[in-house]
Image (spheres, rainbow, N blue to C red):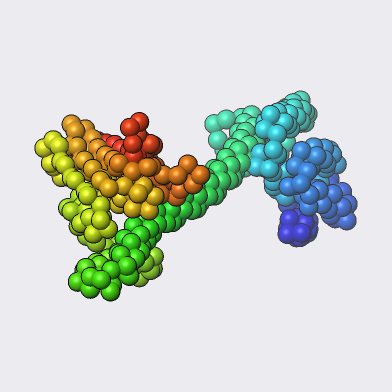
């Protein structure tokens, strides 16, 4: 609509001034009809760019053959049509060769007019004062102007297409990045939930098992040996406080406004207390450390502690054992933890519980391995290996 209004206005002004591009133009009404015919196809130029440039090109040549009074607006309309093909035609091969075809056709038409001007009667060049023949100067001027005009239309259309393509690629990459970030966030949340679930299982299962055994022992000897019952109840109290302390630490991680308390996480230095809790249930627990003790990453230490904790919990709950041997080996590139007992082993009908699954998941985080199963002679074996060399170098 804007192009049409501009075409009507410019045509009216040109006719009012008498500044015609060609001699003997048609009437103003006929010129306005040509302007309307040139402008209307632009309404659908983005949807049908190829068809519009062909139609506009044909009407442009026809309008010049009829010697319309103005040539500025028709040239601008043709520029828009060529530009639209370059900017909006999806088939880039068609876009390229259709524009080349239109430009070649226009230069053929221009050449025809130039030859006709050179062979025809000489125009009126009253004010000509330059060193070049006025007819030749007119031809060169028209040729250079049209070369710049059509080259500019071609290049601007191509730049618009490339700019739109880069923008679309950036939007696509941005969307892919957003989805990747969401997926990573969901994975991190899932991993954190699994870690917390493992910690909750280890804490609750171990401490509740110890509390249950001690409470049962206190009940049995409450009348016959009050001192022993008192010791058992004291162990229950201490175990409950320890469990509550660890649960508070885990729940604190879940709070949005809480900072994780890394110091609260148990490690290798807390193993003696864990072993004492197991001894309090009546187990004979032996502990051996082999190799040169050294500092290990906190994550490895926590995983080793949880493996020992879960293994002792299983012994207390299922093994009916008398003796448990806990061994820790500091190897060159790994930390190995081994727990063996002389009990009957886990009942086969129970199958692998959440504790063993949690152990494997903990060890998998560090690239470790787990061996668990009944021993040949008697009892049950749990052996965990945790690599430490790569993490210590990092």
Pick whichever, 28 or 99, lies toward us: 99
Residue 198: tell me if it is visible. Answer: yes
Q: How many numbered discs sit on the rendered protein? A: 0
The residue positioned 53% from the left and 46% from the top of the image is 176
Q: Quadrant where the N terminus lies?
A: bottom right
With respect to residue 4, does 141 lie above or below?
above
Quarter of the image containing the C terminus?
top left
Left or right relative to 347: residue 60: right
Relative to 87, residue 35 above or below: below
- Which residue is found at the position 23% from the left and 38% from the top? 335
Above/below status of 71 relative to 229:
above
Q: Residue 303 in the image: state x and y as whole percent.
A: 30, 47
Q: Where's residue 381, x and y in %?
A: 33, 38
Please tell me which residue lies in front, 275 or 241: 275
The furthest residue to the left: 292
Q: Looking at the image, which residue is at 38% across and 36% down?
A: 374
Q: Is residue 259 left or right of residue 17?
A: left
Residue 99, position in %: x, y? 70, 33
Q: Residue furthest front?
A: 224
Residue 124, quarter of the rendered image: top right
Comparing 320 with 90, the one in front is: 320
From the viewer's side, name the closer residue of 12 and 280: 280
* Residue 280 versus residue 363 in the image, above or below: below
Q: Position of residue 47 (x, y in %)?
A: 76, 46
Residue drawn 67% across the image and 33% down it: 92
Which quadrant of the figure has residue 244?
Answer: bottom left
Q: Does residue 147 appear left or right of residue 192 in this picture?
A: right
Q: Is residue 303 visible?
A: no
């Amino acid at each position: 609509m804007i192009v049409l209004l501009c075409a009507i206005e410019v045509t009216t002004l040109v006719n009012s001034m008498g500044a015609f591009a060609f001699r003997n133009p048609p009437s103003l009404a006929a010129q306005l009809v040509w302007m309307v015919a040139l402008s209307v196809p632009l309404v659908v130029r983005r949807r049908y760019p190829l068809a519009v440039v062909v139609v506009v090109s044909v009407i442009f040549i026809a309008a010049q053959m009829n010697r319309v009074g103005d040539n500025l607006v028709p040239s601008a309309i043709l520029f828009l049509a060529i530009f639209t093909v370059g900017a909006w035609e999806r088939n880039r091969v068609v876009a390229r060769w259709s524009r080349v075809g239109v430009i070649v056709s226009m230069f053929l038409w221009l050449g025809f007019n130039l030859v006709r001007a050179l062979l025809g009667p000489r125009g009126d060049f009253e004010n000509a004062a330059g060193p070049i023949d006025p007819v030749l100067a007119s031809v060169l001027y028209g040729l250079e102007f049209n070369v710049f005009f059509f080259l500019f239309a071609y290049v601007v259309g191509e730049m618009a297409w490339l700019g739109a393509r880069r923008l679309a690629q950036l939007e696509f990459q941005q969307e892919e990045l957003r989805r990747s970030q969401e997926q990573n966030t969901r994975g991190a949340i899932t991993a954190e939930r699994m870690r917390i679930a493992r910690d909750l299982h280890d804490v609750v299962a171990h401490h509740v098992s110890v509390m249950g055994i001690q409470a049962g022992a206190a009940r049995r000897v409450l009348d016959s040996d009050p001192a022993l019952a008192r010791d058992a109840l004291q162990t229950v109290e201490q175990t409950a406080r320890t469990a509550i302390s660890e649960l508070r630490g885990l729940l604190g991680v879940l709070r949005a406004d809480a900072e994780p308390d890394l110091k609260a996480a148990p490690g290798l230095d807390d193993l003696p207390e864990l072993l004492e809790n197991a001894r309090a249930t009546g187990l004979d627990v032996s502990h051996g450390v082999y190799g040169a003790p050294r500092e290990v990453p906190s994550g490895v230490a926590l995983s080793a502690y949880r493996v020992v904790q879960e293994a002792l919990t299983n012994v207390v709950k299922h093994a009916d054992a008398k003796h448990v041997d806990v061994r820790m080996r500091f190897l060159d590139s790994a930390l190995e933890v081994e727990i063996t007992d002389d009990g009957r082993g886990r009942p086969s009908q129970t199958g692998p519980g959440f504790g063993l699954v949690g152990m494997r998941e903990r060890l998998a985080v560090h690239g470790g391995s787990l061996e668990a199963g009944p021993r040949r002679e008697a009892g049950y074996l749990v052996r965990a290996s945790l690599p430490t060399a790569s993490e210590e170098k990092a």
